[in-house]
Image (cartoon, rainbow, N blue to C red):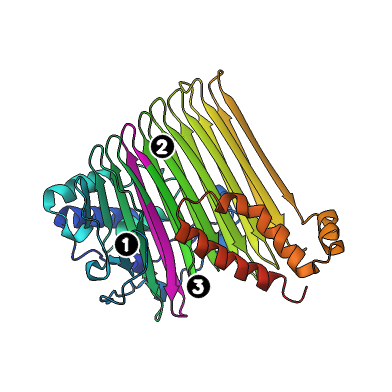
Amino acid sequence: MTKAAPTLNADFLEAAGSNLPSPLQTLLAQRGKALVDMPLPTRRTENWKYSSRYLQLSDAMASALPSGRKAGPALAFDGYHVVIHNGVVVPEASDFPDIDGIEILSFADLDDIAAQQLAERLDNTLDSNAVQMSRLNTARFEDGLFIRLKPNAVMEKPLFVICETDAHATGSVYPRIYVEAGTNSQMTLVEEYMSTGTEPALVNTVSEFSLADGANITSVRLSLEGTNTQHIGATGARLLANARFDSHCVGFGGPLRRHDLQVRLEAAGAECRLNGVAVTQGKQHYDNHTTIEHVAPHCNSEETYRNIAADESHAIFNGRIHIHKDAQKSNANMSNKNLLLSTGAEIDTKPELEIYADDVKCAHGATIGRLDESALFYLVSRGIDRREANTLLSMAFINELIAQIPVEAVRETVQARLNQFIEQTFKGA
């Protein structure tokens, strides 16, 4: 007799978004009804087979963590910033840009017309069957950040979105971001996920990008939460003609870390570059799933992901490129390299190419290995102690991608965290 798959606890479908405009409240109610008895991922769920055992949704976690943050000390950023605390935008703690052609509002501040338009667009960038848990976000978000760039609008400095989870009690939060980039508009968006407190918490995030002709968006995403926090995130992007989407994702492991990134190249000349780094240690976990859909001809994609796993941790990469039958003259390249720093660590990688057009240039590859003993011997023989040699080689493995992050403050933050990770990993080596 086959055991029934576990389903989502009904407590996770409690009413949400009481401060939102009525069109968004209606959307949440509809999504909540659709999730009744939703099966949870198991090892038999193909895109969750390596991660389902890490998903721990206790009954107490169903409660939304309250947001009571007020304005605090000014944050030091070379750019603008928005604070989202436990899923709710905090205007008094934020620094919104005042630029012609750029509109940034919380979902709660949208009028009914704008809210109705947004409700019709949410989830349009994502394949909900592949990102099952994103549907929970759409049923539970309490607020969100809406960003609209009108045609030719340019935000010259980056916009930092600081998503804070206050885990001083057990519960869950559902940050939501929607970016509408008009023709030939440009911006850099930095999403930084962090947490305080030590109680078990679930962070379920969704960010969506809709790029019109010629729009140019750089997305930087940092997962920096504490070891008590499970993080399940989804990012979707749809690109029209000659639009460009650059993504830089950096993640540090935890009890569960999962990020799905889906990009659709829907008109000629669209292109994307996806870079990613994930590091795990102890018994941590990190799972990156990416999909690039080449729907139209003459589109380009470049994808490079790196994983480092130490101790008894587990890292996963699954990258899929789908070349549709009309996507002639497509260029697509995917590279995934992985570094094991211990015999107890595990890395699973699965690069996929699905091609239905005959005039394309595509390549993909994956490697899993350990630090080069000959390189270690060379460094040690030149007077460098073994611990420092291990550090140098490990950092060299990922520095190529970190150097490509176009925001200096982010590079410095990431370098500091990576140095801490490496020092802990090789402590006593």
Say the numbered circle drawn on residue 81. Answer: 1
Q: What residue is drawn where x is 75% and y is 63%?
A: 390
Q: Are marks 1 and 3 in contact (CB under 8 Å)?
A: no
Drawn side of residue 68 relative to residue 345, left or right:
left
Query: Of discs 3 and 2, which sits in the foreground?
Result: 2
Image quadrant holding the C terminus, namely bottom right
Q: Which residue is mark 2?
A: 244
Disc 1 crowd, CA 10 A, few/some/many (<14, 14-19, 20+): many
How far is mark 2 from mark 1, CA to CA? Answer: 23 Å
For the residue labelled by badge 2, is the local secondary structure a helix, a strand or a loop?
Answer: strand
Query: Real-space Cα distance between discs 3 and 2?
Result: 33 Å
Query: Residue at coordinates 28% horizontally, 59% vertically from top-left?
Result: 144
Q: Is residue 87 left or right of residue 236?
A: left
Q: Which residue is mark 3?
A: 226
Q: Secondary structure at mark 3?
A: loop
Q: Is residue 216 above or below residue 297?
A: below
Question: Badge 2: how crowded within 10 Å, few (<14), some, or many (20+)?
Answer: many
Residue at the image point whose x is 22% and y is 70% from the top: 92
Contact? badges 2 and 1 (CB < 8 Å): no
- The earlier-in-sequence mark between 1 and 3 is 1
Does residue 94 appear in the picture of this structure?
yes
Q: Is residue 209 above or below residue 307?
A: above
**228 in relation to 193, above or below:** below
Q: Position of residue 44 (x, y in %)?
A: 58, 51
| In the displayed structure image, the side of residue 241 where residue 151 appears, left or right | left
The amino acid type, in three-letter code, at marker 3 is Gly
